[in-house]
Amino acid sequence: MAEYVRGFVIPEVADVHLAFSRVIRTAQEAVVKLRGTQLQTAAEATVAELRAAYVDFNDGLAVAARRASVEAMKAMRERLDATQVRPETDASPHLRDLLVARPLTVGKIETGMVGVADVAELDRAINPRTPSYGTYWRAQEYGTGQGEVPSQVGRVLFGYFMAAGGGDPTPPQAQYAGGGGPHPVFQSAGGQRNAGLAGGYIGQTRSGARGGVGGLGTIGVELRPRFFVKFGADAAAVQWRENIAAVQERAIERIAATSVV
């Protein structure tokens, strides 16, 4: 089963599906009992209306979940773009392309529920230059030194910054402490694990093991949280709640209209 960072859940949705099943079954039993009477036609119409109401309810949940999924992905990507500090790197796959939200169903039964930010997809975001460091999405979402993401302040690295594609290698420079440097990629020149983070580098310069000019640098500023999953989920949740409320209200009205028999 997929794991998601956030989700929209309707705890009682299973009970509603069961309630529809019970009321339709009761209406069918009424048809049997009223067969041959003047109320048979009305009873059969009640069954048909209840079945139609259930189909509409199930379809409505599907539409609400699908719309929320699309909005969540759109809002997550917009937030990621809006909080970008450095230029794009050449890393693939890009974190932006791994922001996935999906409707959660049980066979043909719709739940209206949505999973936002598939963890398995996010875990594919690994810096190819420093694969031993593992996935980096948590540091981008929550910032470093927050919760389960360890602090990076004081960590000493050796390497150099370079442009996407590997050009123009330059050592860490004090004037770019805290971010704002010209290049998006940090390349470890000594084989050490590193976070590929911007900010707070100072140190001496010497040749890097992979060519170019490397330097010692100390991380002096924590990576700020970007909250792209949080903002994306929150943005989609508003319309989702409105759509689910509309589906529920419509179902109640249709069921109430059949109570004449």
Image (cartoon, rainbow, N blue to C red):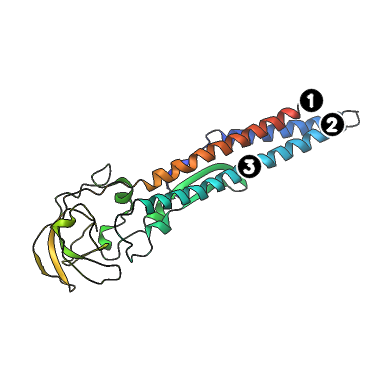
Residue 166 left/right relative to 39: left
| Type of amino acid under label 1 | Val
Q: Is residue 137 visible?
A: yes
- Which label belongs to residue 60? 3
Q: Position of residue 4 (x, y in %)?
A: 43, 47
Q: Residue at x 12, y 64 (%)?
A: 215
Q: Position of residue 71 (x, y in %)?
A: 50, 48
Which residue ends up furthest to the top in the rendered image? 260
Quadrant housing residue 176: bottom left
| Type of amino acid under label 3 | Gly
Q: CA distance from mark 3 to mark 1?
A: 25 Å
In depth, the one of 49 and 172 nearer the eye is 172
Q: Residue at x 44, y 41 (%)?
A: 234
Q: Split into 4 quadrants, where in the image is the C terminus?
A: top right
Q: Residue at x 20, y 52 (%)?
A: 178
CB atoms at circles 1 and 2 under 8 Å apart?
yes
Q: Position of residue 163 (x, y in %)?
A: 27, 67
In depth, the one of 110 and 125 nearer the eye is 125
Check the image and report above or below for 210 versus 161. below
Q: Position of residue 188 (x, y in %)?
A: 19, 64
Q: Residues within 10 Å of mark 2 (few under 14, many from 20)?
A: some
Whichever of labels 1 and 2 marks the residue nearer the N terminus, that label is 2
Disc 1 designates what residue? 260
Check the image and report above or below for 42 versus 214. above
